[in-house]
Image (cartoon, rainbow, N blue to C red):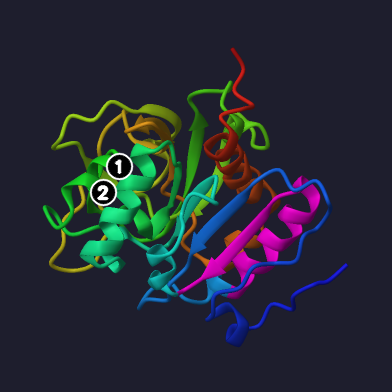
């Protein structure tokens, strides 16, 4: 059985892990492009996804090349924007992704991928379901499970201590979402931000993970995942894997 060694050089190219077993359930496309604040996570997340793929019998293409969207997206059960917003796609690639979603494709949006310039690609803003406003400095906070029936909550406690950038968002397009996790703003300082910036919090309704449907597809969003070491954390990986599983298959949610 072949195995691909995770290195920065390999992670910078399009690559598909070898089939972990004959019975691969589905295939993902993972777009992970380094940027100013998010780059060290790339090889770590790749290695963790390789382990999850072997454990859960799926395959994936891991790339930092948006040109992959020029190809056939129908082979992928879901597209994962891993700390990489849709603005990285050119107009033709955006059209291909929109067509993919209209045909029943699915998407997973992770942390930085939820930040996109206002009105730059309104369709993608609606896909995310919320628009980024600001965030205070990274702090430890208490995350509460809102929907214990959703797979992205199965591996974490009802009240979860986590340290992250607690994104504040708005809903200019009135998109209906189903919250999965909510951050308790009383557990951190919502005003702790850099000079010249203002953060006021969102109150009791402050989702940091949710799901909804767009076109004919499923979309899972988690705003968590700022630091590279988070992609080694078993509870965070359980959260991410649960969302991926649901997005790719539509299964796992308790009825």
Residue under the image location 64 percent in, 68 percent down: 16
Quadrant in the picture for residue 158 = top right
Q: Which mark is residue 124?
A: 2
User: Element at badge 1?
Assistant: helix
Farthest top residue in view? 255
Q: Is residue 13 visible?
A: yes
Farthest bottom residue in view? 9
Q: Is residue 121 above or below residue 38?
A: above
x and y, in percent, of residue 58 in the image? 70, 50
Residue under the image location 63 percent in, 67 percent down: 46
x and y, in percent, of residue 123 in the image? 21, 45
Q: Residues within 10 Å of mark 1 (few under 14, many from 20)?
A: many
Quadrant in the picture for residue 42 = bottom right
Please provide the residue range marked out in magenta.
43-64
x and y, in percent, of residue 64 in the image? 46, 74
Q: Nearer the viewer, residue 51 or 167?
A: 51
Taking the image as shown, residue 214 lies to the left or right of residue 199, namely right
Mark 2 and mark 1 in contact? Answer it, CB < 8 Å.
yes
Q: Is residue 213 above or below residue 117?
A: above
The residue to which callout 1 is attached is 127
**Main SS type for the magenta part?**
helix
């Amino acid at each position: 059985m072949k195995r691909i060694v995770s290195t920065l050089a390999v992670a910078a190219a399009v690559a598909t892990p070898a089939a972990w077993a004959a019975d691969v359930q589905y295939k993902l496309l993972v777009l992970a492009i380094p940027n100013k604040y998010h780059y060290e996570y790339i090889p770590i997340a790749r290695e963790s996804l390789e382990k999850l793929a072997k454990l859960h019998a799926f395959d994936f293409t891991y790339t930092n090349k948006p040109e992959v969207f020029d190809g056939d997206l129908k082979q992928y059960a879901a597209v994962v924007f891993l700390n990489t917003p849709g603005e990285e796609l050119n107009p033709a690639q955006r059209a291909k992704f929109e067509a993919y979603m209209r045909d029943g494709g699915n998407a997973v949006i992770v942390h930085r991928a939820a930040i996109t310039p206002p009105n730059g690609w309104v369709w993608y803003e609606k896909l995310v379901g919320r628009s980024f406003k600001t965030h205070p400095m990274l702090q430890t906070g208490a995350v509460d499970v809102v929907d214990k029936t959703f797979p992205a909550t199965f591996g974490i406690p009802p009240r979860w201590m986590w340290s992250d950038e607690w994104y504040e968002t708005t809903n200019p397009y009135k998109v209906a979402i189903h919250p999965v996790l909510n951050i308790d703003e009383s557990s951190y300082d919502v005003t702790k931000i850099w000079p010249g910036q203002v953060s006021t919090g969102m109150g009791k309704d402050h989702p940091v993970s949710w799901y909804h449907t767009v076109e004919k597809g499923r979309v899972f969003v988690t705003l968590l995942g700022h630091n590279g070491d988070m992609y080694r954390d078993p509870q965070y990986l359980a959260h991410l894997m649960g969302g991926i599983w649901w997005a790719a298959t539509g299964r796992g949610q308790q009825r």
